[in-house]
Amino acid sequence: MVVSQPASAQLLVDPLEVTMVTAATTRVSASFSLSNTSNEVVQASITRSDWDRVENGDNRFLPAGSSGTSCGSMLTVSPLSIRVEPHTSRIVRLAAQTDVAVTKECWDIFFVEEVPRRASAKGNSLQYIFRTGVKVYVAPPGLSRDGAVENMAVEDVPVTPATSSTTPVTTVARAPVATKRQISVRFHNTGGMHLVAKGRLEFRRLDNSLAMQVPITEFPTLPGATRKVMVDVPSGLAPGDYVVLALIDFGGAELVAGQIDFQAK
């Protein structure tokens, strides 16, 4: 028999992103907190990893020091092992020792991993290990914030059908794959620091009147990276020819924009 207990993280980690801006001093400090929401003592370890983000927004975790974008020995964390009493909080401290001038942004991720307790049930049991990542950026002041919409396209994206337990295992013929139309927007972070952008798509008639608009939810982009954001074409758009404008706000002085022709059928 396998015994499985309901799984839930016991430590709340806040914040999940920390930005440390170097200044005239040679040491910059920051912190994040661990709050134990349970009635039990929680032991946690803290480990470090490199990371980056692929074009669709998924995070990719890499061995520490392997990416060339890590802050390396300049950035330290303390403690590496921590005990949090029930319904209390502890502070994890970060320090950036900038003896050498920092000229570009670097970033790491620190994983807070709860050490599982011994299973109290007899027999075989499942144990869940919860790991929460805190992304830490270190940057000098005055880095540029720039971006551009490099490309837009209309794409027919397959829709994954819902499966049912009553569906036969074998079928003679397959139904046609359903698709939905989306507008892809490629945003390039051409500046020196990470950005969090948002925006909207405007569907404009050929006389430039606005037919519909769709929000583009917030998305982060690392320096020099490109993000491909997919936005559903809104239902209810009348058949006809349109110009689709993508307007992106990344916190710079002005919005950046791109456009593409679109025909609704």
Image (cartoon, helix red, strand yellow):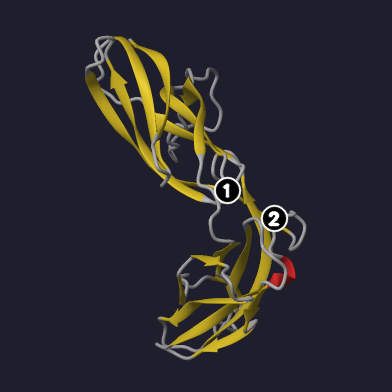
Residue drawn at (58%, 72%) of the image: 24
Q: Nearer the viewer, residue 98 or 149?
A: 98
In the image, residue 196 above or below residue 66: above
In the image, residue 146 above or below residue 183: below
Q: Residue 70 in the image: state x and y as whole percent.
A: 69, 60
Residue under numbered circle 1:
222
- Quadrant of the image occupied by residue 26: bottom right
Q: Is residue 88 something one can see in this rendering?
A: yes
Residue under numbered circle 2:
69
In the image, residue 234 above or below residue 220: above
Please indicate whether residue 155 sits to the left or right of residue 47 in the image: left
Q: Nearer the viewer, residue 60 or 203?
A: 203
Q: Is residue 126 something one can see in this rendering?
A: no
Mark 2 vs mark 1, CA separation in Å: 10 Å
Q: Amino acid at mark 1?
A: Leu
Question: Where the N terminus falls, by quadrant?
Answer: bottom right
